[in-house]
Image: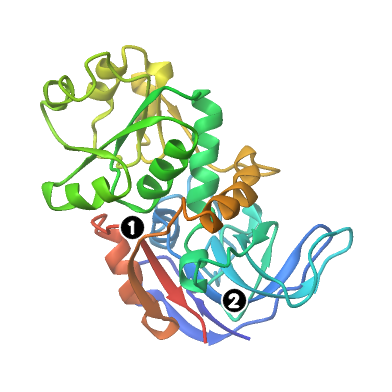
Amino acid sequence: MFAVRYHRYGGSEVLGVEEAEEPHAGPGQVRIAVRATGITPADHYLRAGMLRSVATLDLPHIPGMDAAGIVDEVGEGVTGTAVGDAVFGLVPFADLGGATAQYAVLEAWAPKPRSWTFEEAGGAAGNIDTATRVFHALEVTEGMTLLIDGAAGGVGTITAQLARARGLTVIGTASERNHAFLGELGVIPVTYGAGLADRLAPLAPHGVDVVLDAAGKGSLAELVAIAGDPHRVITIADPDAARHGVRLSRSQPGESPGWAGLPLAAELADQGRLTVPLHAVFPLKEAATAHDLSATGHARGKIVITVP
């Protein structure tokens, strides 16, 4: 098969399209002919070697954590999914990638919503998993107010919509140019940065119940002060979390509590209650450009690579 791979750590220049050995579905897995895959910050952190202290890659490595496509192999023990089904989902955690290729193996998946294109579905699963894990960790319930720091990105936009579907009020930080965009998603927008507590006061006179830091821009001290308790704050992006008493949420080997969110999200999508905002879509040959754009941290929604 053809795939995007890199043979050494480095910048986006190490990425290239080349031939690679096909993967095959093991027990409890399916293989798909990939149509689209999303880019996550972890993809360029891994490629740059920034996570070598906690994650060792077998080089050459194919990036990509989530994907959408057509099932063409079904592993032993899999029920309810057949060859020819359109699905979206996540690659095995232990592989730390593999989706930016002609074929990929998924260990968690759900039927692709009829209302989503493959591009939208290809960029959805990782963010749905993250959002659902965060809800589980924060023990969110209907009626709560959730503050998302960095609400206009891929994780923020999906988390906000899923939170609203659970009956939460969502306030999201973003630059002013993204305020109208957040408003269209049902989010109360507020400008990020110093002095956030003062700007929040009229928007949430009774305070916020839980906080997600999706930006990782060094705001944890202020977010803890706003929440009043570090246990009510969770980050997916700031490695300095422990110093503030805040939990850092990451995918772990084994079944994730976030996997249950995939079929639920698919149902919401077909009800018209969940969209996947796309910032940009690139062909496979422009994977390096897509990685560079993702690394800026300024995407409004998801960056996706399509596979011919």
Dot 1 corresponds to which residue? 301
Residue neighbourhood size for the residue with mark 2, other residues' Cα within 10 Å, grouped as few (<14), some (14–19), many (≥20): many
Dot 2 corresponds to which residue? 34
Query: Going by the image, does 208 lie left or right of 24?
Result: left
Q: Amino acid at mark 2?
A: Val
| Of the pair 175 and 275, the residue shown nearer to us | 275
Query: Looking at the image, do the residues carrying marks 1 and 2 touch, with CB atoms under 8 Å apart?
Result: no
User: How far apart are the two marked residues, 1 and 2, measured between alpha carbons?
Assistant: 21 Å
Element type at mark 1: loop
Res 77 quadrant in image: bottom right
Q: Residue at x 85, y 59 (%)?
A: 79
Query: Going by the image, does 113 lie left or right of 293?
Result: right
First in sequence, mark 1 or 2: give its number: 2
Q: Residue at x 47, y 55 (%)?
A: 272
Against 174, is 169 above or below?
A: above
Q: Residue at x 55, y 61 (%)?
A: 66
Res 204 quadrant in image: top left
Res 200 quadrant in image: top left
Q: Amino acid at mark 1?
A: Gly
Against 124, is 280 above or below?
A: below
x and y, in percent, of residue 16 in the image:
44, 82
Q: How is the image coloured?
A: rainbow
Mark 1 or mark 2, which is nearer to you?
Answer: 1
Element type at mark 2: strand
Against 94, is 222 above or below?
A: above
Query: Going by the image, does 221 lie left or right of 115?
Result: left
Residue neighbourhood size for the residue with mark 1, other residues' Cα within 10 Å, grouped as few (<14), some (14–19), many (≥20): many
Against 44, is 163 above or below?
A: above
